[in-house]
Image (cartoon, rainbow, N blue to C red):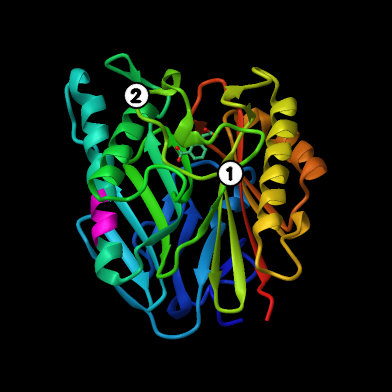
Amino acid sequence: MNGLHLMAHALASTPVDANTLGGASLAGVPGIRPWPEQRLRMVGEHPADATWCEAWCMDGPLQQGGDNGLRWRGNHDLLYGVIELDEPAARVAERGKHLRERAREAYLRLFALLRSHGTPHLWRVWNYMAGINAQDQGLERYRWFNLGRHDAFSAAGAPTERQVPAASALGWADGPLSIAFLAGRSAPQPLENPRQVSAFHYPQDYGPRPPVFARASLACNGAHELLFISGTASIVGHETVHRGDAVAQCEESARNVLAVLGEANRATRSGTGHRAEALAHRVYVRHVADFPLVRHTLSRCLGGESMTLMQADICRQDLLVEVESVGMARLSP
Ligand code: 3EB
């Protein structure tokens, strides 16, 4: 395979460093990878998950660079980067404002890099931050983050609705604001979910600025089409459903993933389309005790080629689980 492809569960097959654009790992050792690595400061389902990594691999020469918390690798068509910014120690009364500023700064640096590299189109973004559900000055930190992200998209002249990237936003107990991104020379096709209000049109009850993401994106690379399904939870319309019921939230999340998959298959340029069985899933679970039941329910409702579970805080207090997925299909000749 020479186009961009994902190697999940690198346990069995270690990615070749020279061919790796970048990727994510669970509890990796800091600083040993030659490629940009987003370390997920989270607990996995099994002890062996400490060696799990997800790597985006490519044949051919790659350029790389970075400074001040930013690292990237790319070629003529693609770029993967990770930016990690510590939040400054601040008085409680200033913390929310600082998170907003950090998010704005991170995205402005990201957009400047994409422009100078010639890969201006964001395909997929993974956002992680400390204490996502905590309140700062009466506003949930996720909402402060949304303010800063929206500020930066606006300031950079990037659309804040419709033509927006697929994304996830999760919380960890402790760590920097960490943003990984995959971008391309070509624009992806964003997709929405007919069962849900588009996130960029959420009402103000969810914060003064809406989140900037699409429910999925389709992007072409070489002979393949990539499908990135955003973090998907138990939301219908714009409301959380099945409060307190992890099994029902898994079932609803799976219905949402399958609805987005259906949209992808109406828009796809591949001959075969994207199959549920071929998707690789990352699953975020609020309570470690729910791991077995979440795996069981999602395997039943969704199946898939691989499924990795990890503990994370979901960006609404009443959400217990969130699923994100990647698929790849061969383009029609
Ligand atoms: C939701 O559907 C759940 O802020 O980037 C999912 C995917 C969610 C991405 C983001 C948030 C984000 O609203 C939360």
- Give the left or right position of residue 111, taking residue 199 as reference: left
Where does the image place residue 298, in percent across and percent down from the top left? 75, 40
Q: Is residue 284 magenta?
A: no
What is the quadrant of the C terminus in the image? bottom right
Q: Eyeballing the image, is 16 above or below 71?
A: below
Q: Quadrant of residue 141?
A: top left
Q: Please state which amino acid type lies under the numbered disc 1.
A: Glu
Dot 1 falls on a residue whose secondary structure is loop
Q: Which mark is residue 208?
A: 2
Q: Is mark 2 within 8 Å of ligand 1?
A: no
Q: Main secondary structure of the magenta part?
A: helix
Front-most of 191 and 224? 191
Most distant residue in the top direction:
138
Dot 2 falls on a residue whose secondary structure is loop
Q: Please state which amino acid type lies under the numbered disc 2.
A: Pro
Most distant residue in the bottom direction:
60
Q: Which mark is residue 192?
A: 1
- Give the left or right position of residue 152, taking residue 209 as reference: left
| Residue 259 in sight here | yes
What is the quadrant of the N terminus in the image? bottom right
Query: Mark 1 to mark 2: distance in Å?
Result: 22 Å
Q: Which residues are magenta?
A: 108-112
Where does the image place residue 106, in percent across and percent down from the top left? 27, 48
Q: Is mark 1 within 8 Å of ligand 1?
A: no
Where does the image place residue 28, in percent across and percent down from the top left? 45, 55
At a point 36% along the width and 70% down the height, the residue shown is 73
